[in-house]
Amino acid sequence: MSKHKVAIIGSGNIGTDLMFKVMRLSDTLEMGAMVGIDPASDGLARADRLGIPTTAKGVDGLIIMDGFEDIEVVFDATSAGAHKANAARLAPYGKRLVDLTPAAIGPYVVPAVNLEEHLDAENVNMVTCGGQATIPVVAAISRVATVPYAEIVASIASKSAGPGTRANIDEFTETTSQAIEVVGGAARGKAIIILNPAEPPPIMRDTVLALVNAPDEATHARIQESIEEMVGRVAAYVPGYRLKQKVQIVPVPADQPVHTLTGGASATHQVSVFLEVEGAAHYLPAYAGNLDIMTSAAMRVAEGIVGQEPENAFETNELEDVR
C-alpha cells in the first residue's frame, strides 16, 4: 500500500511524539519532513537520525525543501500565534493543515464526533487536549438529552505542560469552551485547566459536569450507554483513554441556582463523568496523556483526510527507539 507524505512543523514534545506515532502506527502516512526553528532541538536530532528530511528554518525552510511538492498534509504543533503565520505562508500551496494549536482558524474536529463532516476542510483545528478528552462525552450526552450547560476540568501534570501550552492558557480555555458548544452540543460551555505540580507526576484526569433536562430514569440509562459507547470510540485510537468510575446522574437540588449557569433554561439532573488518559509513552512519559491524546487524534484525522481508513491503528510496526 502506498503511503501519503506528511510534514510536522514544531520539533518540541508534541511534534516529536507525533513523528514517532506516524512512523510506528500508521499504515497510510509516512514522514516527509520534520520542521523546527531550533537547530539543537531533540526532535530535529531524532528525525535526522531516523533519516527524515529536516529543516531548522521553520515554514520557509519547509517550502524550499526537496520533496515539498509531495507532502499532502502538514501538522502544525507550534503555537496559536505561529500557526496563523504558518497557515498564511502555506496557503498558496494547497496543503491540508491539521492544527494542534488553539488558533482555531479552521473548524473544530474531534475524530470520534465529527471527523466525517470536515474531511474536505483545508485547515482543521484539533481544539485542545482537554477538548479531545471531554467533548466526546458532552456529545454523547447531548445526543440523548438537552444539555443547557457543560463544564469540563482538565487536570494535567505540570511537567507535561511545555512552553507552548503555558503560553496559550487563555486560548486553551476559550477554544475548548467554544468547542464544547459547537461540537459537543451544549448550549453553554466552560473549560478549566489545572497544572498539577505533584510528584510523581499524575496522569491526565478529566471531569465532565453536564446539566441536563432529563427527568425520567429511562433517559438516564440511555445517557450512560451513550457515554460508554463514546468512550469506546475514543479508546479505539487512544488506548489509554478510559472511564475512571461509573457515570453519576443525580437530581439538581431545588434550591440550587443553576439558572446562573444555564441562562434560565431548566435542568433536572447533573451528569458527572470522570476520565483518565494514560499516554502510550512512544516519546513522552506515560503521565503525559494530555499530549498523547492530541497526537493520536491528529494522526487519526490525517488518516481520514487522505481517504483511507487505518486498518488497525495499534498494530504497531517495530521501530528501534533511538532514545
Image (cartoon, helix red, strand yellow):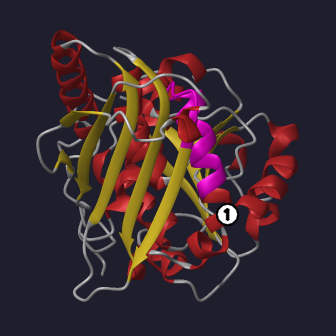
Q: Position of residue 134 (x, y in %)?
A: 39, 43
Q: How many marks?
A: 1
Q: Is residue 67 above or below residue 308?
A: below
Q: Is residue 66 magenta?
A: no
Q: Which structural element holds mark 1?
A: helix
- Give the amino acid type for the residue marked by disc 1 in the picture: Asp
Q: Nearer the viewer, residue 103 or 171?
A: 171
**In the rendered view of the protein, which quadrant contains the C terminus?**
bottom left
Q: Residues within 10 Å of mark 1 (few under 14, many from 20)?
A: few
Q: Position of residue 299 (x, y in %)?
A: 44, 43
**In the rendered view of the protein, which quadrant contains the N terminus?**
top left
Q: Residue at x 72, y 59 (%)?
A: 80
Q: Residue at x 48, y 41 (%)?
A: 257
Q: Residue at x 70, y 49 (%)?
A: 68
Q: Left or right of 147: which side holds 73? A: right
Q: Position of residue 148 (x, y in %)?
A: 50, 27
Q: Left or right of 75: which side holds 199? A: left
**In the rendered image, is residue 218 in sight?**
yes
| Quadrant housing residue 320 | bottom left
Q: Position of residue 164 (x, y in %)?
A: 61, 72
Name the residue that disc number 1 marks. Answer: 170
Q: Which residues are magenta?
A: 173-189
Q: Is residue 18 above or below residue 200?
A: above
Q: Is residue 263 above or below residue 82?
A: above
Q: Is residue 185 magenta?
A: yes
Q: Nearer the viewer, residue 247 or 156?
A: 247
Q: Residue at x 50, y 81 (%)?
A: 45
Q: Left or right of 191: which side holds 63? A: right
| Quadrant housing residue 41 | bottom right
Q: Which residue occupies the extreme front position in the image?
A: 255
Q: Nearer the viewer, residue 257 or 156?
A: 257
